[in-house]
Amino acid sequence: MAFVTHQFIRTLSSTAVRNAAIKHVTIIGGGQMGAGIAQVAAATGHSVVLVDTSEDILKKSAKGIEGSLKRVAKKKFADKPEAGEEFIQKVMKNVSTTTDAASVVSGTDLVVEAIVENIKVKQGLFGGLDKVAPEHTIFASNTSSLPIADIASSTARLDRFGGLHFFNPVPMMKLVEVIRTPATSQATFDSLVDFSKALGKHPVSCKDTPGFIVNRLLVPYMMEAIRLHERGHGSKEDIDVAMKLGAGYPMGPFELLDYVGLDTAKFIIDGWHTMEPGNPLFAPSPMLNKLVEEGKFGKKTGEGFYKYK
């Protein structure tokens, strides 16, 4: 009887997901990624609430969104400054902020998490929100490296949980990886795909495997570039030039590592190495570890493989 009841509730929830378009979005995390997602969602007519731990962070996020919109308006309405200002105000009206996630989740259609890449923190967040969110609400993580199923395990809505991996900078990058776990319902997956399209993005379907598609190819490529340099088979400058001029890449692997953040690259590869220690593609790099230990994370700290001062 309990099984039948559970299945009945799950069917009702999936039906609600399928029949209701996503209109209200709650985004947890006011950093660069969260603010970017908030901007594109608000610009496409969605009602957005941006959540973070302090008002100071949220004020900075709102200022960043407005600044980004001004750059968009300057190009889009070059000959009509008044229309550009109207566009900015219209979008900003769709964005509100709060430090109390529980107070807004009770009326939201979709929760997108874009916080620190820490599995326990993410699980704690979703576990708490699961208790107050309506049955129809879909949960999604913007994680770039952690298993979606592991994050979802802290909730009772496994069928209404998926991944929405956006790329930085969100307003410019067209791709969204839509990740489904074995438990993600078809209705949930379809809703996430439809939402991505509504944002003007191009969604691709991904399985819940390490790195999904882009990072599963990109991170090992960057790590192999480091190993090539470690072996003395090429300078970082020559490797970067070779990949730009020979493969047509806009950035070389070392330039890209500095842009992404060496701490982020190390975090990802360390996590994958822990999951699959026998996979040579996931082997750690002594050179990368040393730079991170020295606090040289790339552009954001002024020095990584290159200096930016």
Image (cartoon, rainbow, N blue to C red):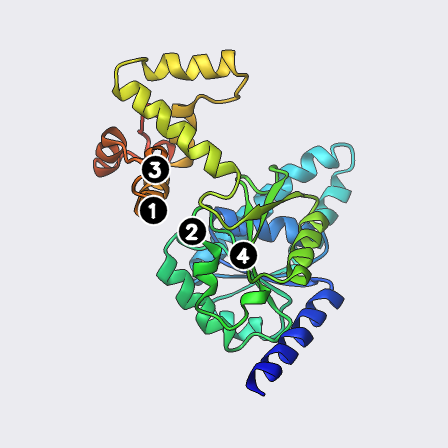
Mark 3 Cα-neighbour bin, 10 Å: few <14, some 14–19, many ≥20:
few
Q: Which residue is mark 2?
A: 146
Q: Position of residue 221 (x, y in %)?
A: 42, 28
Tell whether label 3 touches label 1 (CB within 8 Å): no
Q: CA distance from mark 1 to mark 4?
A: 19 Å
Residue depth check, mark 3 versus mark 4: number of the one nearer the observer? 3
Using the image, tell me which numbered label, if any, was put on residue 279.
3
Q: CA distance from mark 3 to mark 4?
A: 23 Å
Left/right placement of residue 53 relative to residue 249 reads: left
Q: Observer-nearest residue: 283 or 175?
A: 283
Whether residue 120 is visible, yes or no, is yes
Residue depth check, mark 1 versus mark 4: number of the one nearer the observer? 4
Q: CA distance from mark 2 to mark 1?
A: 8 Å
Q: CA distance from mark 2 to mark 3?
A: 17 Å
Q: Secondary structure at mark 4?
A: loop
Using the image, tell me which numbered label, if any, was put on residue 181.
4
Q: Which residue is mark 1?
A: 271
